[in-house]
Image (spheres, rainbow, N blue to C red):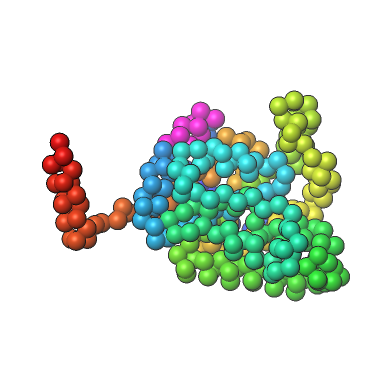
Amino acid sequence: MDFEQRFRVPKRGFRLADRDPADRAGLSKAQGRARRAADIERLAELQDRFYAEGTRGLLVVLQGLDASGKDGTIKHVMSGVNPEGVLVTSFKQPSALELAHDFLWRTELALPARGQIGVFNRSHYEEVLVVRVHPELLANQAIDPARAEDPALWEERFRDIASWERHLTRAGTRVLKFFLHVSKAEQRRRFLARVERPEKNWKFSPADLREHQYWDAYQRAYDAALRATSTRQEPWYVIPADHKWFLRTAVAAIIVQHLSDLDPQYPTPSEEQRREMHEAAALLRAEA
């Protein structure tokens, strides 16, 4: 199963409403878990080479509504990698310092270094999602909220985001973007579980329920953002998220496919380095 092609947002003809949040691509739960286990093992190997090579970066963007599975995806997909080579950043409500800069500033600061895999839990896309659904937030950026009615504002932000991501690609960081597509009914079920199950109480926030009421507005905002910013080199993937096991399987498979395409290699020592290693080995053996 080619998850990369199945869930990639195409250049034309995309409608979020056409994507099924419960899609399992014909897999059983057992098949999905087996596929994920193999991919996580492969991911560990590729990440080790990627970190050692140290010449390129990989940015994984996870976007989704509340309870769509972002935290669990990070936990399960990244379970086998070396933490030293992974940088996870969760973007919360912007601080006063962040609001005093342009909307891409705080994400620029969190980019992965060469050799690292960076994971954004939410991202710069909040500026064309949450802010579009709640235009009063524009006032915090010294922008008149009335401008939200002008499509040109959002089109400008889409172009700014696409240009920034293209710059990252040219500078050696591959950008992968995942929208975790959960249904309204499944989100409601997960919210109820946070209330009814004591071990999940800590996850509950009244703000989640308030945002749930804006479901349709968020669907429209995501539809516009995905269509405007999914490109051949910086693609979006709409991942069905009603079944957590399948969500994690698909994300792991796509990340592994991209890392395999990058084909990282362990550095090859120069002749001088080989000579130094042989000399060091000779000294160590002489100690025996």
Q: Is residue 134 above or below residue 256?
A: below
Horizontally, residue 127 falls left or right of residue 237, namely right
Tell me where residue 8 sits by quadrant.
bottom right
Horizontally, residue 218 falls left or right of residue 287, namely right
Asked whether residue 38 is drawn in magenta, I would say yes
The dominant secondary structure in magenta is helix
Residue at 66% across, 38% down: 242
Q: Nearer the viewer, residue 124 or 238?
A: 124
Horizontally, residue 76 falls left or right of residue 264, namely right
- Give percent across and percent down for residue 158: 66, 68
Residue at 38% across, 47% down: 48
Location of the C terminus by quadrant is top left
Residue at 56% across, 39% down: 75
Residue 44 appears in the rendering = yes
Horizontally, residue 266 falls left or right of residue 260, namely left
Asked whether residue 23 is drawn in magenta, I would say no
The magenta region covers 29-39
As drawn, which residue projects farthest toward the front? 287
Q: Nearer the viewer, residue 153 or 81?
A: 81
Q: How many marks?
A: 0
Q: Nearer the viewer, residue 139 or 208?
A: 139
Q: Is residue 92 above or below residue 11?
A: above
- Give percent across and percent down for residue 100: 74, 68
Q: Nearer the viewer, residue 219 or 133?
A: 133
Residue at 22% across, 58% down: 273
Residue 178 appears in the rendering = no
- Give percent across and percent down for residue 106: 64, 62
Q: Is residue 221 above or below residue 154?
A: above
- Give percent across and percent down for residue 167: 53, 70
